[in-house]
Amino acid sequence: MHGESSARVAGRWWQVWRPYHSPRQIVRVVQRAEGPPGLRGRDILEAAALAVVVALALKMLVVDFCYVPSLSMAPTLLPGDYVIVSKLAYALGFPERMPVLSLRLPREIRWWYRLPERWDVIVLDFPGQLGQSRPEIPQYYVKRVVGLPGDTLRFSGDTLWINRTAYLLPGMRETPRRIIVPARGMTFPLSPQTLSQWMPLLLREGLQVEVHRDTVYVNGKPTTSYTMPQNYFFVMGDNYPNSSDSRSWGVVPQSAVIGKAVLIYYSVSETGRLRWSRIGRLVH
């Protein structure tokens, strides 16, 4: 009796145990817990793709990085300095040319909430030499804003006049000349006599200019005046005797401004030594 009862209980115990502990059931449970093969790899790829998208978005909209190759901005910036550029300092949106991909939009898509101020150190997309279009491959320059939209600049030897204020720049040797920095909405007359003064700006705006007899034609239409569609800036290097800047290649359109240089995050000398004293220095 006792043995029969034990056998009956043991049989029931085996019936309960068997469905949950057979090898097949264990394998199925483990497979369900681990998920289908390759899921972890896809997660890694998705995370990497998301990281790339976020990095590109930050580079296009928020912050960029610039390497200083020359002495044109010395002593403020030296060759081997790496600079953080704030793209939110002046505007929000997409510039004409996308970083990394170097794609060019028909026009910039940016909301400007403030303009660069005088003496700001900015990074710009080099607009090209006078009379030439912007280079196909972007070239980033670091310069200081000297002339604002609407300013009148006069050079004479080692003296620079900005409107009615004179600045002595020792070592500079400039021939006397007068420059008007165009402002958005500014209208100037066009005639065969005045065309030479404004021709570089018209070409920089991508316009086709011709003269037939006594008439100026802009994009095939007879024109007697032109209104500037955007602001311009006059920029110079701090090491002005040894700087290529607006004195040689003209004023910079607002659409070519990339952002404001704010901080030196890394610096290395020509011999490869870290310049610790420059790392973390604000750009003024």
Image (spheres, grey):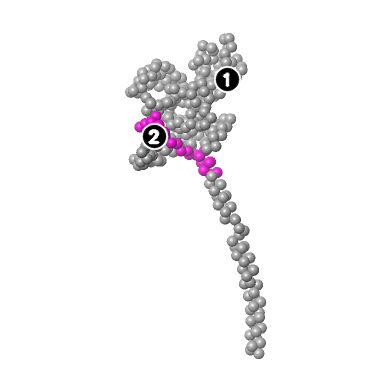
Mark 2: give few (<14), some (14-19) or many (20+) Cα within 10 Å. some
Q: Is residue 119 left or right of residue 51?
A: left
Q: Magenta segment: does it hold 24? A: no
Q: Residue at x 51, y 11 (%)?
A: 193
Q: Give the magenta part as a residue range.
A: 53-80
Q: Residue at x 46, y 23 (%)?
A: 249
Residue type pointed to by label 2: Pro
| Residue 164 seen in this snapshot | no
Q: How far is mark 2 from mark 1, CA to CA?
A: 39 Å
Q: Position of residue 277 (x, y in %)?
A: 34, 40
**Quadrant in the rendering for residue 220:** top right
Residue type pointed to by label 1: Gln
Q: Which residue is mark 2?
A: 79
Q: Magenta segment: does it hold 68? A: yes
Q: Position of residue 164 (x, y in %)?
A: 39, 20
Q: Is residue 120 left or right of residue 192?
A: left
Q: Residue at x 37, y 31 (%)?
A: 74
Residue 232: mark = none
Earlier residue among tags 2 and 1: 2
Q: Which residue is mark 1?
A: 208
